[in-house]
Image: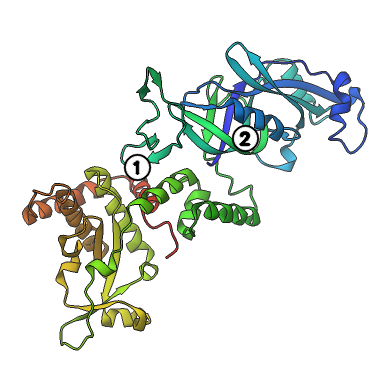
Amino acid sequence: MNEIKKSFDGAPIKADAAQDISLINQYALRELNPDEVFAFAANLCDDQVDRDQEAFSVRSLKKMQRLFLGKPLITDHAWSAKNQAGRIYRTELVRDGNVTRLRASIYMIRTAGTEETINLIEGGILREVSVGCSMSRCTCSACGEDLNYNYLTSKRECKNGHAVGNIVNGKTVHCVLEDPKDAFEVSLVAVPAQREAGITKSANRSKELSDEEWAKRRRIFESSLGCTITDEIWAAIKAGKISSVEVAAAHKKQADSEKTFYSDYVPEDDFSGTSIRFVMIPDSVIDKSTRIASYRALGFCRKELELQPIRITWFATYDDAQRLGLDLSAMKKFYNAPELLGTASRKNPNLIVLRYPQANAGIMKTIFHECWHAFQMKDEYNTMDEDNAYWYMDDAYKRYCALSEEDKERLFYDELLMKDYRTK
């Protein structure tokens, strides 16, 4: 799960620099005296359901109690050494009625640079804090199974069909945040992300983290997936355009539904005839603009027609493949197969085969056309009506062109999640 930040009203608990100086000095390189130190306390987080229908489990809070010890106090989640103002020196779990809270004692050094901040805290102006941490799992409150994002319903659901926000046994299903991986910091903020229990997800840390740290995070993430993701997907994760949770959910969905395409639907030939020769070509040779155009078109149709994940694969004439500089000896070859201009032989609703190169508009219209046939194939009694397929192609293309660039970009990233996130 990506980094999250949950914010709570910092109701004061007892923190005394004189009494706590021995605890504080565990984090100092020289012995501090109480007159040099300002100490205050804050509620960091609790086990109550927030507006995003998420809650920390008590088990998570117990682990976070240890993880937050020694973590820095900063402002507005700006990860910079110059922005560090204090440090957590004590944490505790407190039971208040039916609520379990994680509380922390924090110290600051009294200097000219911190005087204004200390005055604002003492005066009750700076009162709210927000914590940054990383969680491993999000589980269903109704049954305890892992929750994953369902692309078709845009909801987080478990394998038992429980969706966040639905009512099960008279209670609203929410996400239980489990297995804390790390605690990063606690921030002073002007306003919590939400009243008493706010949250901000998928913070973009690309400017603060080093290339080495990003590479480390990528290796860990790929190891958890069991496959290598593309540079394009990783760039989208770093930019906050898609989350690692979505990628993991898409990985599972594709792994459950993926089929062997080439052997079932692409004929082979020894090229002894005189007809036009073709070869299947790898996705890696398709130029970026064509890939984006095809993904956007596919995302538009899959969302509108509620289709399952669909794979696009590419072929070229023998001559075009040579012009692309490809080694044809190891590529799958066939001849004169007009059915490959769209869904292969109308047999597989989860595959669209496209010829390359051709104009992006032509590629998109073919996708719109074939997605309509995939929609028809959901009903085994439906016939392949070409007139309706052409009508939908023209109408969908017009409606797609009317979308904003932002909406089109989101279609592209959504489609990356569902299919081409792995390095081929």
Q: Residue at x 38, y 71 (%)?
A: 285
Mark positioned earlier in the residue sequence (2 or 1) = 2
Quarter-of-image position of residue 316: bottom left
Residue 189 in picture, x, y percent from top left: 63, 27
Do the CB atoms of the residues marked 2 and 1 lie less than 8 Å apart?
no
Q: Residue at x 90, y 23 (%)?
A: 34
The residue singled out by tag 1 in the image is 151
Could you tell me the amino acid type at mark 1? Tyr
Q: Residue at x 40, y 68 (%)?
A: 284
Is residue 325 toward the left or the right of residue 349 in the image?
Answer: right
Relative height, residue 90 to residue 70 (above, below): above
Viewer-side residue, 80 vs 260:
260
Quarter-of-image position of residue 159: top left
- What residue occupies the far top of the structure in this picture? 97
* Count of numbered circles on the image: 2
Could you tell me the amino acid type at mark 2? Gly
Is residue 181 toward the left or the right of residue 367 in the image?
Answer: right
Relative height, residue 89 to residue 290 (above, below): above
Quarter-of-image position of residue 79: top right
